[in-house]
Image: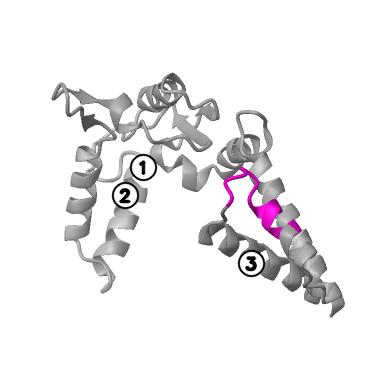
Amino acid sequence: NRLVIGENFMIEQYIKHQGTKWATSRAFDPNSLIWMSTAMDNFTLEEVVPETGEVSLEYGMRHITQPALVIGVQTDVLFPCWQQREIAQVLRKIGNNRVSYYELDSIFGHDTFLLNTVAVGGAVKGHLEQEPNGASHLHMDAARSASILLGALWNREFSVESMERLFYALDARNLGRVSIDEVSSLLYLVVLRMGEYCDNMT
């Protein structure tokens, strides 16, 4: 078979299609690809340890204590799965006991997260639902808080006791304070629930 540039493999057709679309789009600057490639090649989670001057992945990730989902794809050559395994291992090593690692066997490489939504969605769902390594308790806390606020709004009950119940539901970690992010998340859930209720009434 005679080789023809850009027509030997299916991936070449995909790349040519995307390249044509980007090049003919007035909103896209071709230099963006250069900067994207440079950013990917130079990105690192490592940081220099002040005391020793050594570059350390553990030191760079020392503040990551929230529940973490790490997904690797066996055919990804941009961010190889061995790097994702290393990230998960380092997170556990520095004391994060809420780390989920999934390694997907997909033919789509780095585009798996775009094209294989079933596999990626399953990994996300598994991470959110499992305990103690998941984050379902966070969603349950938010849902409980939203339920209390919805009840107060529905019954027009804004007594000191009802507001105290709402505060303690938001302050699940017993810190004695509630962040603006927690309140914003709660209001977002309330708006969603009200939207669902209105949809059901129409």
Q: Is residue 44 above or below residue 189?
A: above
Q: Secondary structure at mark 3?
A: helix
Q: Quadrant of the C terminus?
A: bottom right
Identify residue for label 2. 15
Q: Is residue 141 above or below residue 53?
A: below
Asked if the stretch drawn in magenta spans residue 168, the answer is yes
Q: Residue 21: x and y, percent?
A: 32, 63
Q: Which mark is residue 95?
A: none
**Residues at badges 3 and 2 in contact (C-beta under 8 Å)?**
no
In the figure, 159 relative to 111: above or below?
Answer: below
Q: Which amino acid does the dot numbered 3 rest on? A: Leu
State the separation of the CA atoms marked 3 and 1: 44 Å
**Between marks 3 and 2, how big is the CA–CA gap?**
43 Å
For the point 43% across and 26% down, the residue is 91
Q: Earlier in the sequence, mark 3 or mark 1?
A: 1
Depth check: give the residue in front, 12 or 93: 93
Image-based side of 123 in relation to 55, left or right? right
Which dot marks residue 187? 3
Category of crowding for the residue at label 2, using alpha-carbon neighbours closer than 10 angstroms: few (below 14), some (14–19), many (at least 20): few
**Are dots 3 and 1 in contact, CB under 8 Å?**
no
Q: Nearer the viewer, mark 3 or mark 2?
A: 3
- At a point 38% along the width and 32% down the height, the residue shown is 76
Query: From what the image shows, is residue 178 above or below residue 113?
Result: below
Q: Is residue 176 left or right of residue 144?
A: left
Say which residue label 1 marks: 11
SS category of the residue bearing label 2: helix
- 145 left or right of 175? right
- In the image, is residue 94 part of the stretch drawn in magenta? no
The part of the chain drawn in magenta is: 165-176
